[in-house]
Image (cartoon, coloured by chain):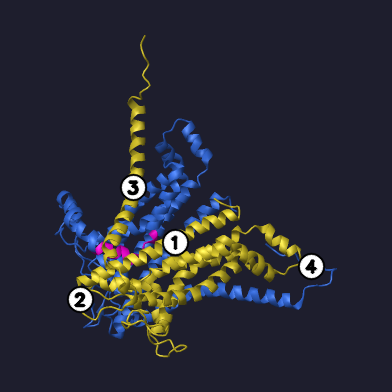
C-alpha cells in the first residue's frame, strides 16, 4: 500500500519528528530484512570456508572415497552420501503415498466435525522434538523392528539382497527409514491437505454429479489439478529427511562401510556430523566434518529451491496470477 | 411381479469396491499416523513419569555413576537461558523483517525476502549448528568476549537462526490480515506512517505475533542438533552465565539415551516427558490463540 503523495500546491505539513520517525522505522526494518537474507549467504560462506582445509586436502575425490580414519587423516564421504540417499528415499517411498492418503482423508473424506481435531493430531506429530522420536526409536521401535517387523519382511523377501543378512539387529538403516517416515509424514500430509482443499468445489461436485465415485473424483479431478503441488510437498519432506541428524544418529548404528542389506547398521551425512561432536580432534577432521555439512547444505539447498519454485508456480496458477 | 434389484453388478460393482478400498486406505493411513503419535506419547509418559519428583527439578545430576536419583536442574536452567537468548535475537529481527516486507518493500524485493526465508527454513539444523561453530566457536579471536569457545550465547544464536524464518513468516501472515481500511483510516487522519505501523498495525496483530513466536519457541526448545557444536560441553551445576556453555534438556536426553547406565535411561525418559509436555502445551495453546485472533480480525478460514 502506497501512501498518497502530497500534491505540489500544498505546503509540506509533516513535522520533523514524523520525517525522522518514518526514516528510522524504514531503515530499521530494511536493515533487519537485509540481515535475514544475509544470514543465508553467511551460512554458505562460513561453512564453505570452514570446509576449505578439507577441500584443499581431498578435493572432489572426498565424494567417492570411502574411509573415515582419524588416525591416518583419511576421510571420504561416499558411504555417508549413499546412506543419506537410501534412508531419505526409502522414507519418502513410504511416506508419500501415506501422506497423500491422509491429505485426502482430511480434505475429502472425514466428516467436517472430526477434520480439525484429527488434522491437529497429525500436526502434533510434527511438533514432537526429534530427540524424543530418537529416544523412542532406540528403546521401543528398534527392538520391535528386530523382533517382529524386520524378521517378518526377511521371512518373505529375504531372497532380495536389501532384505537379506541378519534381521535381528535393532539399530539399522531400516529403523532409520521408519523414523524418517514418521518425521516426514506430518509435513507432507499437511501440505497435501491444503492443496486438496484448494481444488474448486464446483469441479469436485461436477465429477460426482456425472456419476463418478469419490475415488474416481479424486483420481480424475483432485489429484491431477494439484499434481505439481503434491510433488513439491514430497520434495519438502525429502529435504527434512535428508537433513535430519539427531533421530537418525540414535537409531542407525553409525557404522561404515555399508552393507547391501537394510537390516544392518549404516550412517548418513547428518548423523555422522552429529555423532562426532565430541570426538573431532585434529583440525583436518573438523574440516572434513564441515565438508560433510557443506555437501548436505548443497543437497538440501537444491531440493528446497526446487520445491519452492514448484510451489510458487503452483500458487501463481491457482490464484490467477494475484 | 418381478422385483428390480438396485444392487450394483458387474462393472458398477467393481467401481464401488475400488472406491471402498481407496476410502479404507485413506482412513487407515490417518489412523496409523495417530496411532504412532499415541504410541510415542504413551511410551514417553509411562516410562518418564516414574522418575519425576521434586528432586528432578531442583537437583543436579547425581555424582554416583551407577545410582539413580539426582535431577536435571542445570539442563532446565540452561534451556531457559538458550531460548531467552534465541528469542532476544530472533523476535526483533523477525518482526522488523516482516514489517519491512508487508509495509515498505516493493513487491519484487518482498518476494525475494520471502523466498530466502523459506530457503533458510529448509536448511538442516545441524548445518546451522556448524555455521555458528565456524563463525563464533572455532575462531582464535574472541568476538565480544564470547568467541573462541562454546557458550549459551553461541547456542542461543544457532537457535535464533532456526526461529527467525518461523517468526518472520508467521508475522507476515498476521500483518497481511490487518484490514487495509484500518491503515488508510489512520493515514487519512494525518498520522504518519511510522505511527500508523506502531500504533495501529502492530497492536492489531499483537496476538498473532505472540502465537507465532510461541510456536517458534516450542520448536527451538526441542532442537538438539544446533547445540552439539555450540553449547554441548558443560559443567554439571546450575549456571546462569550466558557466556558459559550450559546444559540443555534436549542434549541431556541425547546423551543419556546413548549412555550405558539404565538409571540414566530413566532420566532420559523423564526429561523427554517434560520436554514433550512443554512443546505440546505451548504449540497447542498458541494454535488455539491463533484461531481466536484470526476470528477477531473477522477473517477466520
**What colour has chain B?**
yellow
Look at discs 3 and 2 and give the one toward the viewer. 2
Are the residues flagged by discs 3 and 2 from a single subunit? yes
- Magenta residues (range): A126-138
Q: Callout 1 environment at 10 Å: few (<14), some (14 to 19), or many (20+)?
A: many
- For the residue labelled by badge 3, is the local secondary structure a helix, a strand or a loop? helix
Counting residues from the start of the chain, the first of labels 1 and 2 encountered is 2
Magenta span: helix, strand or loop, mainly? helix
Look at discs 1 and 2 and give the one toward the viewer. 2
Mark 4 sits on what residue? A6
For mark 2, name the chain: B
Q: Which picture quadrant has residue B20?
A: top left
Q: Residue furthest front?
A: B54
Residue pictured at 42% horizontal, 55% vertical: A233
Report the side of A41 relative to A126 (left or right).
Answer: right
Are the residues flagged by discs 4 and 2 from a single subunit? no
Q: Say whether residue A93 is visible.
A: no
**Vertical relation: B266 (above or below) A319:** below
Image coordinates for residue B244, horizontal then vertical, percent: 39, 85
**Alpha carbon separation for disc pair 3 and 2:** 41 Å
Amino acid at each position: 500500500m502506497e501512501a498518497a503523495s502530497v500534491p505540489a500546491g500544498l505546503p509540506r505539513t509533516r513535522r520533523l519528528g514524523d520525517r525522522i520517525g518514518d526514516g528510522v522505522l524504514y531503515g530499521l526494518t530494511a536493515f533487519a530484512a537485509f540481515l535475514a537474507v544475509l544470514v543465508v549467504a553467511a551460512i554458505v560462506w562460513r561453512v564453505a570456508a570452514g570446509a576449505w582445509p578439507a577441500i584443499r586436502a581431498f578435493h572432489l575425490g572426498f565424494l567417492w572415497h570411502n574411509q573415515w580414519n582419524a588416525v591416518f587423516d583419511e576421510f571420504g564421504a561416499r558411504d555417508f552420501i549413499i546412506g543419506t540417499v537410501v534412508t531419505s528415499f526409502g522414507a519418502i517411498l513410504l511416506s508419500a503415498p501415506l501422506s497423500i492418503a491422509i491429505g485426502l482423508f482430511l480434505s475429502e473424506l472425514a466428516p467436517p466435525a472430526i477434520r480439525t481435531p484429527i488434522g491437529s493430531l497429525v500436526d502434533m506429530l510434527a511438533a514432537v522434538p526429534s530427540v524424543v522420536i530418537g529416544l523412542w526409536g532406540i528403546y521401543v521401535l528398534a527392538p520391535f523392528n528386530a523382533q517382529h517387523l524386520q524378521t517378518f519382511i526377511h521371512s518373505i523377501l529375504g531372497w532380495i539382497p536389501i532384505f537379506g543378512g541378519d534381521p535381528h539387529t535393532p539399530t539399522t538403516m531400516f529403523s532409520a527409514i521408519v523414523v524418517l517416515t514418521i518425521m516426514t509424514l506430518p509435513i507432507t500430509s499437511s501440505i497435501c491437505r491444503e492443496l486438496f482443499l484448494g481444488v474448486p468445489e464446483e469441479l469436485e461436485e461436477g465429477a460426482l454429479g456425472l456419476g463418478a465415485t469419490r475415488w474416481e473424483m479424486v483420481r480424475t479431478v483432485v489429484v491431477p489439478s494439484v499434481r505439481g503441488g503434491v510433488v513439491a510437498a514430497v520434495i519438502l519432506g525429502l529435504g527434512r529427511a535428508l537433513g535430519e541428524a539427531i533421530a537418525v544418529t540414535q537409531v542407525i548404528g553409525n557404522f561404515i562401510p555399508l552393507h547391501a542389506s537394510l537390516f544392518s547398521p549404516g550412517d548418513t551425512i547428518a548423523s555422522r556430523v552429529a555423532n562426532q561432536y565430541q570426538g573431532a580432534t585434529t583440525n583436518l577432521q573438523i574440516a572434513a566434518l564441515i565438508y560433510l555439512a557443506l555437501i548436505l547444505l548443497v543437497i538440501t539447498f537444491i531440493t528446497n529451491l526446487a520445491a519452492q519454485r514448484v510451489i510458487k508456480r503452483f500458487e501463481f496458477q491457482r490464484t490467477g496470477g494475484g | 411381479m418381478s422385483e428390480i434389484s438396485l444392487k450394483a453388478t458387474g462393472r458398477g460393482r467393481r467401481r464401488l469396491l475400488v472406491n471402498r478400498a481407496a476410502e479404507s486406505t485413506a482412513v487407515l493411513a490417518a489412523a496409523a499416523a495417530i496411532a504412532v503419535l499415541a504410541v510415542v506419547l504413551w511410551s514417553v509418559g509411562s516410562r518418564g513419569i516414574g522418575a519425576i519428583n521434586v528432586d528432578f527439578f531442583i537437583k543436579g545430576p547425581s555424582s554416583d555413576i551407577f545410582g539413580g536419583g539426582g535431577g536435571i536442574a542445570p539442563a532446565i536452567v540452561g534451556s531457559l537461558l538458550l531460548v531467552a537468548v534465541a528469542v532476544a535475537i530472533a523476535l526483533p529481527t523477525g518482526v522488523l523483517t516482516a514489517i519491512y516486507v508487508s509495509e515498505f518493500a516493493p513487491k519484487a524485493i518482498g518476494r525475494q525476502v520471502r523466498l530466502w526465508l523459506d530457503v533458510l527454513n529448509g536448511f538442516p539444523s545441524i548445518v546451522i549448528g556448524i555455521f555458528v561453530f565456524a563463525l563464533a566457536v572455532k575462531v582464535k579471536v574472541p568476538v565480544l568476549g564470547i568467541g573462541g569457545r562454546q557458550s549459551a550465547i553461541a547456542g542461543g544464536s544457532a537457535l535464533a537462526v532456526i526461529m527467525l524464518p518461523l517468526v518472520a513468516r508467521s508475522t507476515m501472515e498476521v500483518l497481511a490480515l490487518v484490514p487495509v481500511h484500518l491503515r488508510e483510516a489512520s493515514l487519512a487522519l494525518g498520522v504518519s506512517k511510522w505511527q500508523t505501523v506502531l500504533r495501529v498495525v502492530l497492536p492489531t496483530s499483537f496476538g498473532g505475533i505472540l502465537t507465532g513466536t510461541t510456536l517458534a519457541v516450542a520448536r527451538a526448545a526441542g532442537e538438539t542438533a544446533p547445540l552439539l557444536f555450540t553449547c554441548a560441553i558443560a559443567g554439571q551445576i546450575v549456571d546462569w552465565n550466558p557466556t558459559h556453555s550450559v546444559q540443555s534438556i534436549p542434549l541431556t536426553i541425547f546423551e543419556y539415551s546413548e549412555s550405558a547406565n539404565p538409571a540414566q535411561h530413566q532420566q532420559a525418559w523423564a526429561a523427554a516427558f517434560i520436554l514433550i509436555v512443554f512443546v505440546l502445551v505451548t504449540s497447542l495453546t498458541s494454535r488455539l490463540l491463533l484461531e481466536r485472533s484470526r476470528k477477531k480480525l473477522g477473517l477466520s478460514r
